[in-house]
Image (spheres, helix red, strand yellow):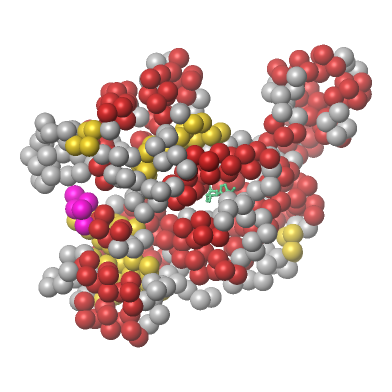
Amino acid sequence: MNNLKVLILDDERQFSEELAEFFQNTGFEALIANTKAEGLATLKRVAVDLLILDVRLPGANGLDILKEVKASYTGLEVIIVSAHGDMDTVIRAMRLGALDYLRKPFRTMDIQIAIERTEKFLLLQQRIRQMEEKNSLISKSLEEKIDRHLIGVSPQILKVLDLAMKVSEFPDTNVLITGESGTGKENIARIIHFASIRKDNLLCTVNSSSVTDSLMESEFFGHKKGSFTGAVADKKGFFEVCDHGTLFLDEIADMPLNLQAKVLRAIEEKKITRVGDTNQISTDFRIISASNHDLEKLVEEKKFRLDLLHRLNTLHIHIPPLRDRTEDIEPLLYYFNEAFSRKINKPTPRIEKEVVAMLKNYEFPGNVRELKNMIERAVILAHGNSLGVHDFPVKDKSKSYARTNPNRLTLMEQEIEMIRQTLQNLNFNQKATAKQLGISRDTLIRKMKKYNIKIRRNEDPS
Ligand SMILES: Nc1ncnc2c1ncn2[C@@H]1O[C@H](COP(=O)(O)OP(=O)(O)OP(=O)(O)O)[C@@H](O)[C@H]1O
Ligand SMILES: [Mg+2]
């Protein structure tokens, strides 16, 4: 296998070694350089895919090195390492074409996430031209900017993409994306950002549940030096950092109520005040938020502010669960099969047609992410040159399991299962289904509503 090569250019030896180990464990080939001269020499000698660059090398300006290497090596991607609080450098570096940044001191999580993201990016960059275009819904130029394709053929996903493309033309409209976990909310947020005129500025992703409560306000609004213990320098918050860009608020349901009030004010005024400061600073951002919770219910429970919800969902995009758009399963299956096979340098296995039928019958509680993981596993473990039903172990939650184990179901579950199965067998003809089940059509419709049984294409049963 042709491993991706990463060069770590940092004067701190121990740190470089630790980082190298991380990359090696992820399947990269890692090289280390501790000075600018050493680094440049290595780049000349070896075709490096990714450079991890400390912007604070003694005796050298990291941003100059960044500029220099980006100009000399077109295929080279750079992640910069910056000191905590040095967001200005980060912004300049991103404008100079850095792919990402890591902040010192490090958290293992951050490195892992950055590596994962980078690996996906690099692999797809390297291979994107060879990939099958057949099922891709978005334009080539956009694909290259976001690190992935959006695959699907169902009317639901086409509608989602259509809305995303439309709203990308309105760079000040806030967008709320809802959908179960793994349906592709972050994907859509990236598509909107990179298709909009904000694309050359930052897309800042903030997960409300990953920031500790005490630091939350400073993370969002920044702080003035000395405003609290630990505030050793002035710092910009997310709202300022993504000036002219997009702020992606992931899982907004987790945002504490007191912060919700402050975020609401920032959105309304487009001005913020850093913690410990009195000056107001103007900033221009679009908010894309995402949630897999029922926000209206949270509003009723007084856990989420209604006025904030109204501000955030100027446009609402809902991504239906994969089980409600089963037409997407097949193209996704082929796409991931091909992508993972290439990744591990195996010939792409053929997929037996029973697999598609079986997966179409599966609930996919983890949606596209689950399908993706399933295929990755199957491709890695596959022996022969084809993938069969046994390569895709689907467990308890599958519809197929329920069907083959009727004894384990409650009466109600059996009823649901029977209605679903009969509808499917009779091509969703409600009249014929009611007749076969020995109930009236009205009763059938009532039961479908009660059990939320959708007929194809997510239509309402009435
Ligand atoms: N239509 C699609 N085509 C290709 N890949 C997809 C599609 N939808 C989702 N994915 C992939 O599935 C994975 C999960 O998607 P994503 O992270 O966007 O989901 P999410 O809705 O943000 O999930 P969560 O709520 O758990 O954060 C990602 O790797 C993403 O690239
Ligand atoms: Mg997400």
Q: Position of residue 451 (x, y in %)?
A: 70, 21
Q: Total marks drawn?
A: 0
The answer, for residue 229, to whether it is visible in the render is no
Instruction: Please state if 312 lies on the left or on the right of 385 as rendered.
Output: left
| Nearer to the camera, 13 or 336 | 336
Which residue extends farthest bottom?
Answer: 45
The answer, for residue 43, to whether it is visible in the render is yes
Q: For the magenta stretch, what is the residue range?
A: 84-89
Quadrant of the rendering where the C terminus is positioned: top right
Q: Residue at x 79, y 37 (%)?
A: 404
Quarter occupied by residue 16: bottom left
Which residue extends farthest left?
Answer: 226
Q: Residue at x 79, y 29 (%)?
A: 420
Is 395 drawn above or below residue 411 in the view shown? below
Residue 88 part of the magenta segment: yes
Q: Position of residue 294 (x, y in %)?
A: 51, 25
Is 406 drawn above or below residue 43 in the view shown? above
Q: Where is residue 299 in the image (x, y as percent from the top left)?
A: 43, 18
Quarter occupied by residue 117: bottom left
Instruction: Please state if 211 lies on the left or on the right of 157 as rendered.
Output: left
Q: Where is residue 106 in the image (x, y as percent from the top left)?
A: 26, 54
Residue 108 part of the magenta segment: no
Q: Which residue is drawn at 31% across and 67% down?
A: 52
Q: Residue at x 74, y 41 (%)?
A: 361
Is 364 drawn above or below residue 415 in the view shown? below
| Nearer to the camera, 279 or 418 | 279
Instruction: Please state if 70 lies on the left or on the right of 230 as rendered.
Output: right
